[in-house]
Amino acid sequence: MLAVDRFDKGGRADLEALRARYPEQLEVLEADLGREAHKLALAWQAQARTVYHLAAIVGVRAVEDAPYRTLQVNLRSTLDVLDLARSRGAARCFFASSSENYAAVVSRGLAPVPTAEEVLIGIDDPSLPRWSYAASKIAGESALFAAARGAGFVPLVGRFHNVYGPRMGPTHVVPELLERCARRVDPFPLWGAEQTRSFLHVHDAARAVVLLSERGEAGVYNVGSAVETPIEELAQRCFDISGHRPKTLERRPAPRGSVARRVPDVSKLALLGFTPGIDLDSGLRECWRSVAR
Ligand SMILES: NC(=O)c1ccc[n+]([C@@H]2O[C@H](COP(=O)([O-])OP(=O)(O)OC[C@H]3O[C@@H](n4cnc5c(N)ncnc54)[C@H](O)[C@@H]3O)[C@@H](O)[C@H]2O)c1
């Protein structure tokens, strides 16, 4: 297997540790997809039959700070990977997409919660930086299916829903909350306390991706947990696990454009035999150990 990354957020040590464990099976390539596709073309092994495209700019802050860059990186990297998948005869191609693709539709009351795969997808306001991410993921899904036509590979979209895990960097609500617990922040600010999300541990997400790539039929699959958790409850769980007890919880408004409820209907993935194995408290404890180290 060949793993490609430009190591924006670290991650090199994790891949190197895997390479040390599986020296015959894993090769690591540093390349900027979208700019350095030639490096990937050179390293692409003839026997590579399954392609997993996960590289992207992600995280509300990163996207809002650089919306055009988000589109550049996410679109160009996807097109480069798909061009190679087509020309090298890949058999299956997985694209990491996002629940953001239908968030605007849910916010407008045009889709139910829990939300299944076949709802409308779209963006609310193209002039708002945050929607550049969903725009890139919607275009990526479309490009995947278009590229598969005639090329013969099986197109598989996984729409991830709040995947979290240790060492993921402060671009997600889970590490953000735990990091503030570690710093004993008090008053403790909480944005969108009343909103809900569903959280899936990265090990479970990885299992789902493998399952999809082995057994999935062409199509879109929600990858997430069916358990809906209010953000305030998530914060309370972080307080319990970290032992931080702030005297004041400062409830602040949710970021503009942020959907009030996000819960996937995961029955399509469940039909392939998937159930999450790591409950939220166990996952948070593992993340806390990596933050509090
Ligand atoms: N974590 C979630 O909750 C979530 C939710 C929805 C969708 N997703 C999608 O899943 C995928 C993985 O997300 P994640 O949370 O692991 O994000 P992440 O930021 O931890 O990982 C993305 C990786 O892509 C790499 N990368 C970015 N641009 C690159 C480029 N041009 N060339 C090579 N490497 C590049 C980064 O270095 C990083 O290691 C992304 O496509 C993301 O959009 C994640």
Image (cartoon, rainbow, N blue to C red):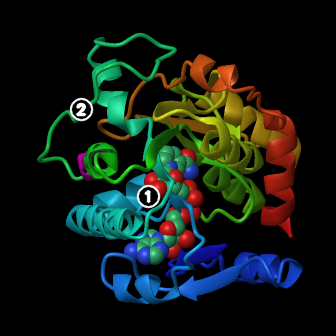
Q: Which residues are magenta?
A: 130-135
The label on residue 122 is 2
Residue named by callout 1: 58
- Quadrant assignment, res 163: top right
Residue 146 in percent (x, y) is at 26, 46
The label on residue 174 is none
Q: CA distance from mark 1 to mark 2?
A: 18 Å
**Viewer-nearest residue: 107 or 46:** 46
Q: Mark 2: which secondary structure?
A: loop
Residue 10 in percent (x, y) is at 61, 79
**Residue at 72% across / 40% down in the picture?**
247
**Residue at 27% across / 62% down in the picture?**
75
Crowd class of label 1 (few under 14; some 14 to 19; many from 20; radius 10 Å): some
Residue 114 in percent (x, y) is at 52, 15
Q: What type of secondary structure mainly makes up the magenta span?
A: helix
- Quadrant assignment, res 61: bottom left
**Residue at 20% across / 65% down in the picture?**
68
Q: Mark 1: which secondary structure?
A: loop
**Viewer-nearest residue: 176 or 161:** 161
Q: Quadrant of the C terminus?
A: bottom right
